[in-house]
Image: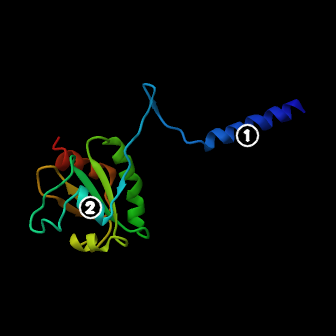
Amino acid sequence: MIKRVLFLTVGILSLMLAACETKAINNGKKENKMKTIELTKADFLKKIVDYEKNPEEWIYLGDKPAIIDFYASWCGPCKMVAPILEELAAEYDGQIYVYKVNTEQEQELAALFNIRSIPSFLFIPMNDKPQMAMGAMSKSSFKEAIDGVLLKK
């Protein structure tokens, strides 16, 4: 009987611990890894470029290079790329932003960038013109673009 109670208690504790969210501890502080950031039109105008005030000129408003993923929730390749972008946002935390624009909800932004196929990615370096890439990319291809185009390593 005691063994059953002990076994049951250990089992319940194991389930409880597995269900809890764990956060990495770094020098006694919780580590907050960057995640992808969903953009609306209003966010885009504040964080990326205010094309309403400056329709003729690209003036990036961010303080770090960025990638914008133009996606749709029903898109298979978009779903394949999403976890890669989450990993990259964490790996390059503090160096770049990784944004997402849902083309179904933000049709004006999709039209502005002439998005005809998804996923499409806008790579925005700090002091250069943005570059568009279409189609799913591998993690190594993203890293090449981040290091070569955005961070100029």
Against 115, is 144 above or below?
above
Quarter residue 152 falls in: top left
Image position of 24 (left or right of 40): right
Against 91, is 98 above or below?
below
Image position of 1 (left or right of 90): right
* Residue at 29% in and 40% down: 94
- Label 1 element class: helix
For disc 2, the marked residue is 44
- Label 2 element class: helix
Q: Point out residue 137 in the picture as x, y percentages from the top left corner.
A: 31, 58
Quarter residue 38 falls in: bottom left
Q: Which residue of the protein is positioned furthest toward the top in this rendering?
A: 27
Q: Point out residue 85 in the picture as x, y percentages from the top left corner.
A: 36, 52
* Residue at 79% in and 35% down: 7
Q: Point out residue 1 in the picture as x, y percentages from the top left corner.
A: 90, 33
Give the residue type that dot 1 points to: Ile
Residue in the foreground of this view, choosing between 104 and 137: 104
Q: Which residue of the protein is positioned furthest toward the left in this rendering?
A: 56
- Give the number of the disc on residue 12: 1
Quarter residue 121 falls in: bottom left
